[in-house]
Image (cartoon, rainbow, N blue to C red):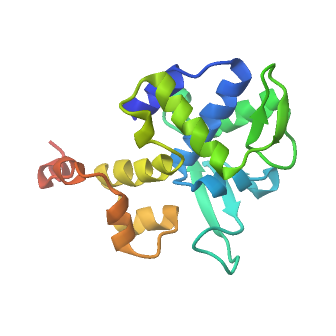
């Protein structure tokens, strides 16, 4: 969470910052692939009292197009709430239909939808501006890997993580989790001390 807050603090330009914050928080909170983030359309978003559900009609591991749903809940802090960040971006950009993630021009003009590769470049740029470690170690995939690492470290079960990420195997979830996960998930942390 500290890295996410640091990245948010380094965002620039009111319109681009609103888009980047929504991209960061939706991607991280939803454990979304770059292509999934790029493909979100207004009609894929269902609002409910706990937050939103995003319908992903097709993804990398869903070639049949059965789709899956990603839950994004209201955050405990306004600063890091993905739903508030999305609402702010949609309002500022005047987006009422079509693609959610769009280009922002030099003078704040809203353009066409972002491609998946653009999302990776935006994540790298955000990390570089926040001066977090080596920006080359980060990309669009970092949002997904970061979700798995943090959720696991905070006690989410493999099954719960797999429901959000859409992974088909526990082995893939474990592959995504960062190396220090085991240290942070010691048995003592489950004692509630």
Identify the image quadrant of residue 94: top right
Identify the image quadrant of residue 61: bottom right
> On the picture, is 193 further left or further right than 150?
left
Identify the image quadrant of residue 175: bottom left
Determine the residue located farthest toward the front in the rendered image: 136
* Residue 85 percent coordinates (x, y): 64, 33
* Residue 5 percent coordinates (x, y): 46, 27
Nearer-the-camera pick, 24 or 68:
24
**In the image, residue 172 above or below residue 149:** below
* Residue 18 percent coordinates (x, y): 68, 28
Quadrant where the C terminus is found in the figure: top left
Name the residue rendered at 60%, 53% in the picture.
34
> On the picture, is 62 further left or further right than 148?
right
Nearer-the-camera pick, 27 or 164:
27
Quadrant where the N terminus is found in the figure: top left
Name the residue rendered at 42%, 52% in the picture.
145
How many numbered dots are placed on residues in this image?
0
**In the image, residue 66 above or below residue 105:** below
Determine the residue located farthest toward the bottom in the rendered image: 64
* Residue 11 percent coordinates (x, y): 58, 22
Name the residue rendered at 21%, 52% in the picture.
185
> On the picture, is 98 further left or further right than 122?
right
Does residue 136 appear in the picture of this structure? yes
Does residue 82 appear in the picture of this structure? no
Name the residue rendered at 53%, 26% in the picture.
8
């Amino acid at each position: 969470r500290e890295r996410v807050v640091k990245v948010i603090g380094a965002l620039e330009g009111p319109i681009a910052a609103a888009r980047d914050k929504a991209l960061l928080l939706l991607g991280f909170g939803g454990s979304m692939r770059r292509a999934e983030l790029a493909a979100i359309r207004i009609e894929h978003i269902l609002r409910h009292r706990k937050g939103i559900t995003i319908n992903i009609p097709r993804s990398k591991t869903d070639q049949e197009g059965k789709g899956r749903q990603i839950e994004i809940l209201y955050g405990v802090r306004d600063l890091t709430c993905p739903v508030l960040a999305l609402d702010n971006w949609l309002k500022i950009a005047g987006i009422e239909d079509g693609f959610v993630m769009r280009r922002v021009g030099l003078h704040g003009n809203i353009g066409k939808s972002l491609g998946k590769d653009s999302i990776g470049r935006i994540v790298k740029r955000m990390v570089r501006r926040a001066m977090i470690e080596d920006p080359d170690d980060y990309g669009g995939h970092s949002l997904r890997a970061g979700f798995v690492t943090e959720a696991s470290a905070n006690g989410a079960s493999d099954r719960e993580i797999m429901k959000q990420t859409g992974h088909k195997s526990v082995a893939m979830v474990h592959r995504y989790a960062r190396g220090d996960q085991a240290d942070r998930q010691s048995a003592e942390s489950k004692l509630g001390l």
